[in-house]
Amino acid sequence: MNYVGCHFEVVPLEPWTDLLINELGDLGFESFLQTETGVSAFIPEADWTEHLLTQIDLTNNEHVKISHQIEFIKEENWNATWESSFDPICVSNRCTIRAPFHPPSLTEMEIIINPKMSFGTGHHQTTHMMVQLLIDMEIKGSRVLDMGCGTGILAIVACKKGASSITAIDFDEWCFNNSLENIQVNGCPSIKVILGDASVLGHEIYDLIIANINRNVLLNDLSAYVNVLAPGGSMLLSGFYAEDIPMIRDKAESLGLSYVENIERDNWIAIKFLY
């Protein structure tokens, strides 16, 4: 099968790149790779028409500038295109995140992610930091909630760290299905995946809540997360920049959370709180 690749430059990147991916998924694009300047999206040539790009609502948004280049990829070059775009990631010399076509690693933990979208493969700074925080925590026997699970990578890390139960939630149907796929590949059938957002949270209580989402969603939904966090529990938050720390901390502390630490990677931030 031949493919068409659309390479988008997005200014500014956040939160527009994620929103663009959502729109492209609705238009039939199957695979995504986030880049330093935006995102590359791929669609079977049989499903491609130039008219598709005129249906992207974000191109009419005055707050973001989106430009693109188109590449036609023949079937025999498809695997090479993916493999050249996706390298294994090693976090803290302890956890390797790789695609199915990479050879096994020798680190203590290995996560296999089908690279349909690089947000959730460890390549994005926020995912890398969340994995870094998770692998340093003792969570054996913990009840874990992963909000905005994406590819399911953080839920899978929690499973391999010995969490007793894990719930992974994402509002995007593509992420829901991809999480199920990656959970099966990594042998983590105990992870429960739910299609939805914070409104689907019930009365189940968690010892650890992970949320790698954009700043506005975090600020809006943080109270819902706290409502299902056990006393003494931990919360890991990412998806925002260094300049957003004061408003994230203010909101979290107003809800009874206590700041523990934060780490930074290219101006992106991940924060750990206790309840």
Image (cartoon, helix red, strand yellow):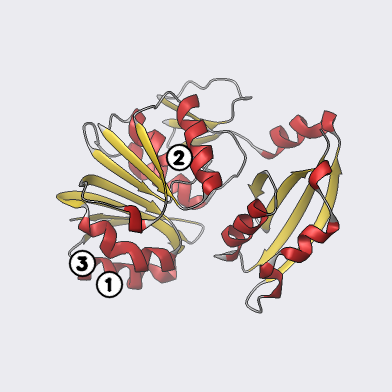
Of marks 2 and 1, which one's residue comes earlier in the chain? 2
Q: Which numbered tag is attached to residue 250?
A: 1
Compute the Cα span from label 3 to label 1.
Answer: 9 Å
Q: Amino acid at mark 3?
A: Leu
Residue at image coords 45%, 40%: 152
The answer to whether residue 51 is left or right of residue 39 is right
Percent of width and height locating residue 95: 44, 32
In front: mark 2 or mark 1?
Answer: 2
Residue at image coords 19%, 49%: 233
Percent of width and height locating residue 186: 46, 26
The answer, for residue 270, to whether it is visible in the render is no
In front: mark 3 or mark 1?
Answer: 3
Of marks 3 and 1, which one's residue comes earlier in the chain? 1
The answer to whether residue 15 is left or right of residue 66 is left
Q: Quadrant of residue 255?
A: bottom left
The residue beneath circle 2 is: 152
The residue beneath circle 3 is: 255
Percent of width and height locating residue 245: 36, 68
The answer to whether residue 233 is left or right of residue 178 is left
